[in-house]
Amino acid sequence: MAQAIGLAGVGARVLSPPAARRHRYGPRWLEAAFTVSLAALVLVGALFYVWQHTRVVRLGYEIERLRQVKAGLVQENKSLRLALGQLRALKRVEEAARTRLGMVTPAPGQVILVPESPIQ
C-alpha cells in the first residue's frame, strides 16, 4: 500500500487518482447518460421550434390562398347581385310580359284594387 508523504501511517489512507475521480464525480455511465439526455433535450427543443416555424409558414400560405378565394367569391357575389337586379327590373319584366306572353296594358275598367286586410 502506498503511504502518504509526511504522515506516519497511523489511520492515514491514500486514494489513487482514478478512484478519487470516480468517487468525486460518480460513475462514468451516469455522466454519459446525463450528457446524452441533455443533447436529446436540446435536439427535441430544436425540432419543436423547426416544426412550429414550418407550421406557421404553411398556415400563412393557407390564409393567403383563402383570402384570394374569398376575394373571388365576393366578386362573383357582386356580379350575381347585379344580374339579379337586372332580371328583377320592372322594365324588363314588362317587356317580357308583352313580347313573350302577349299581355297588354289593362283598360281602366279592368283594374280592381283590393283593400289590404288588417290581419296579416
Image (cartoon, rainbow, N blue to C red):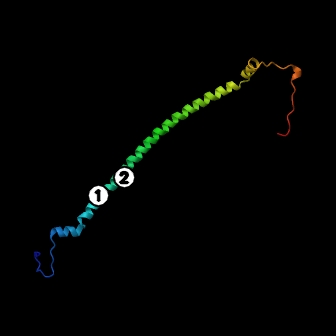
Tell me the residue that label 1 is attached to.
Answer: 36
98 with respect to 8 (left or right): right
Corner quadrant of residue 18: bottom left
Q: Nearer the viewer, mark 1 or mark 2?
A: 1
**Disc marking residue 45:** 2
Q: Which residue does the image show at 21% across and 68% down from the upper left? A: 22
Q: Which residue does the image show at 36% across and 49% down from the upper left? A: 47
Q: Amino acid at mark 2?
A: Gly
Dot 1 or dot 2: first in sequence order is 1
Q: Amino acid at mark 1?
A: Val
Measured from the top left, where is residue 85 in percent x and y?
68, 27
Measured from the top left, where is residue 29 in percent x and y?
25, 63
Corner quadrant of residue 6: bottom left
28 with respect to 102 (left or right): left
109 with respect to 96 (left or right): right
Q: Which residue does the image show at 41% across and 45% down from the upper left? A: 53
Measured from the top left, where is residue 55 in percent x and y?
43, 44
Q: Secondary structure at mark 2?
A: helix
Measured from the top left, where is residue 86 in percent x and y?
68, 24
Number of labelled discs?
A: 2
Query: Going by the picture, which residue comes out furthest to the bottom?
Result: 10
Q: Which residue does the image show at 71% across and 24% down from the upper left? A: 89
Are dots 1 and 2 in contact, CB under 8 Å? no
Q: Secondary structure at mark 1?
A: helix
